[in-house]
Image: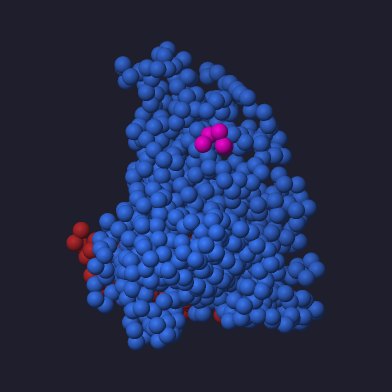
Chain colours: A red, B blue
Amino acid sequence: MKKTIRFTLNGQTAEMEVNENESLLWSIRTHLNLTGTKFGCGIGLCGSCVVIVDDSPVRSCMVNADYVENSRVLTIEGLSNNGTLHPIQQAFVDHDALQCGFCTPGMIMNAYALLLENQEPGREDIINGMEDNLCRCGAHNRIIAAIQEAGSVMKGDI
Amino acid sequence: MKDTTDIVNEVTLPPAGIDRRDFLKRLGAGVTVAVALSDFKSLGAMTFQQRELPTDWNAFLRVAEDGTVYCYTGKIEMGQGIITSLAQMMAEELDVAVDRVKMVMGDTVLCPYDAGTWGSLTTRFFGPPLRAAAAEARAIFLEMASEWLGVPVNLLKVEDGVVFDERNPYEKVSYAELTEGKQIVRSLREKPTLKKPAEFKVIGKSMLRTDAYEKVTGKAKYAGDIRLPGMMYAAILRPPVHGAKLLTADTAPAEEITGVELVRDGDFIAVLHSFPETAMNAVDKIKAEWDIPEPQFDDKTIFDHLVKAGTDERITQEEGDRDRGRDVSHEIIETEFRDCYIAHAPIETHTATAVMEGDTMVIWGSTQTPFGSQNQVAQVLGMPLEKVHIKEVFIGGGFGGKASSPQVVEAARIAKLSGKPVQLIWSREEEFFYDTFHSAAVIKVTSGVDEQGKFTLYDSDIYFAGGRSSELFYKIPNHRVRVISGRDAHAFATGPWRAPGAHTNVFARECQIDIMAHRAGMDPLEFRLYNTDNNRVIRTIKAVAEKFGWTSQGSPEGKGWGMAVGYDSGTYVAMMGEVEVDENTGRVQVLRVVTAQDMGLVINPQGAILQVEGCVNMGMGYAFSEEIFFNGGDILVKNFDRYSITNFSMIPPKLETVLLDLPDEPSQGGGEPGIVTVGAMIGNAIFDACGARLLRLPMTPERVLEAIRSG
């Protein structure tokens, strides 16, 4: 049975028609054609599909599309502003905090939620917050540095 | 009105199967330089591991009318950073800014044939001809500019694609202007003069990744990000275990689902739907019966099995007399090392999007071998090679696992059977099931030292790790290395995993050496230097020791130091690290890793450092936690819950890299060497910390505890 979901997507009102039990991940990728949110494992273990729903990180493979009804959804595509990178994106670029780039959108979105809570995270805070986001290329140390720098920028220190 | 010329010099053959006129049309206007692949060797390319190469020419670069430099390479970008370093080479020899260079990668129509992106070969093998093509293009532009400006070539200079009279910089013309309205195709006439290291402005300078912007914004296109009108998502009926044969399949329950389409070709059954999850769920509804073979061995009995299955042996290194070696030895140590099957586990699963466009099968596939995939699709579908077109995409991690890319053929088959555009994304379970694993292995070593601590004997039998990185760069008068393999030893596919077999070989050799140093009462660093006269080894060890601050006093209380040396892809790597072992839990934390690499001319030092760091971090996984559990053909690992790759808490807080400054020596490989030493270095550091000697990878907390107890 089809159902229309209404929500705010990257600052704009949006709606999509979904069937029962369709996951948010595949709805975003298929109905909305936003392919920055990645499939990695399908059961919430890798973090490639993290999006922000009402300021919290959500593994989009683990929730149904109707989870976002009347909510605010932010995906990687909505993070930069008219071509200006968000401080987290910029810090990932400046620190070379990526290689193949496939985990990168999920890393950045998860880090975004982390920095909403705490803009001065220590190394341990970042490790705890990012532990379940997997990167196979081994950019971890640079991701930690990028998140710390982004926090400073967001706080207005830099 | 501009004169339109069409000069084609010395270009004898178009690429295989492609009509020449068509090819020129496809290239478009501008100045194109082609290189015959048969010239690679004379251009200074590393040619070991070289297979039969086609002798036809291929375009390497084109300077378009707007001044954009298109660099064509059959190599692919999977994170290793050649999208940046190849552009640097091009920019250097052509004298243009790096951001003018647009990389075109892995497109089987536009790019020169390439056997595949593996073996840390790009810089060594593809770099020299690429630089030669760029230097040739620069020479062509100088000739044209000379005519345009009426100034002799020797008085011309180039800066960012603008040629000018060195006596009067206002007398100038740009590559773009020179190119306008022309199509010039040249092949290399003679070996062009490449720039000397002293002249480098771009090579050797650190650059950030040029693909980062696309990747941090979600714009970068991977094979699963392609969207085509009317595209269907496919899921394939899979056997429950390797070796199972399909007996019956009742597809009706799947076909009852609204919108499901089913294609079948013998045992190949796929379900299509416009929504990916529906296709995945539908294929699970198929009621299939399988003939399942009895398991013959599992992850515990595999080692005995491998030793028995090892029927073919070849001696790769031999010198002296092993009996004499035994006689003169003061200490003889026999050890058996073991390693398990491990997965590539890229975050992007194998994916392909395929569509028939007219009579051509067009495919975007996550593959390290676009040309190999093209060939396979042509063969399986019975299509001419030139009617299969693999297109450029980013690859979400490969590590050797996408050297095998059956999903490309699968997607093409489904596209052909259904007549629709098709996207196939392997589930994580399929990714683990069909991975070509790093092989489990057994390495037996007997070695000896005399009373002075001199190496006297090294006798090693390597079962199923192959010979990579097993070179003995120590001075051992009596030695033999046998590499033993056999057919049908595995219950599933194995294949190249980032420096295939190398970390197993280095784990065995470098841990054995550590054991011997300890028995000889010598510091592991001192012991190694005492037993080698290989200058590259010595300078690499000294570089890492200096940065690390290794002293014969050894590690501070409560910590352990370890080192290991490796040789892979032409590069020498020496690694030192500090660890802390929790003797109650067996948990090991690596606190610091320092790596030194002797890798010749480094194109992009920052990129090379990224690769070393990636190697160290990825290597933590095989060292501590990665292991495929299986029972016969049944792969018990289905997802990341039973397969732990490196996560944030595992990585060393301090990671340092030293690249030896060797600009006059040929470039060596950088994507793999750093991973080969990680396991051995950690094993040796654990021993130093707590006296526990680990002989088996991965060094899980349970195995560390066991080794402490039996210590």
User: Would residue B80 be found to the left or right of residue B19 on screen?
Assistant: left
Q: Position of residue A138 (x, y in %)?
A: 41, 64
Q: Residue at x 45, y 22 (%)?
A: B142
User: Would residue B447 be found to the left or right of residue B686 on screen?
Assistant: right
**Is residue B43 located in the magenta-colored stretch of the structure?**
yes
Relative to the observer, which residue lies in front, B214 or B258? Answer: B214
Magenta span: predominant SS is helix
Q: Position of residue B56 (x, y in %)?
A: 66, 35
Q: Is residue A64 visible?
A: no
Q: How many numbered dots are placed on residues in this image?
A: 0
Q: Position of residue A48 (x, y in %)?
A: 46, 69
Looking at the rendering, the stretch of residues picked out in magenta corresponds to B40-44
Residue sitting at the far top: B150
Q: Quadrant of residue B155?
A: top left
Relative to the observer, which residue lies in front, B250 or B329? Answer: B329
Q: Residue at x 24, y 72 (%)?
A: B556
User: Would residue A108 be found to the left or right of residue B114 on screen?
Assistant: left
Image quarter in which the C terminus of chain B is found: bottom left
**Is residue A58 located in the magenta-colored stretch of the structure?**
no
Q: Residue at x 61, y 51 (%)?
A: B370
Relative to the observer, which residue lies in front, B145 or B546? Answer: B546
Q: Residue at x 54, y 69 (%)?
A: B443
Is B108 placed above or below B354 here? above
Residue sitting at the far left: A157
Is B94 placed above or below B355 here? above
Q: Quadrant of residue B548?
A: bottom left
Is B687 placed above or below B425 here? below
Q: Is residue B314 visible?
A: yes
Q: Position of residue B602 (x, y in %)?
A: 39, 45
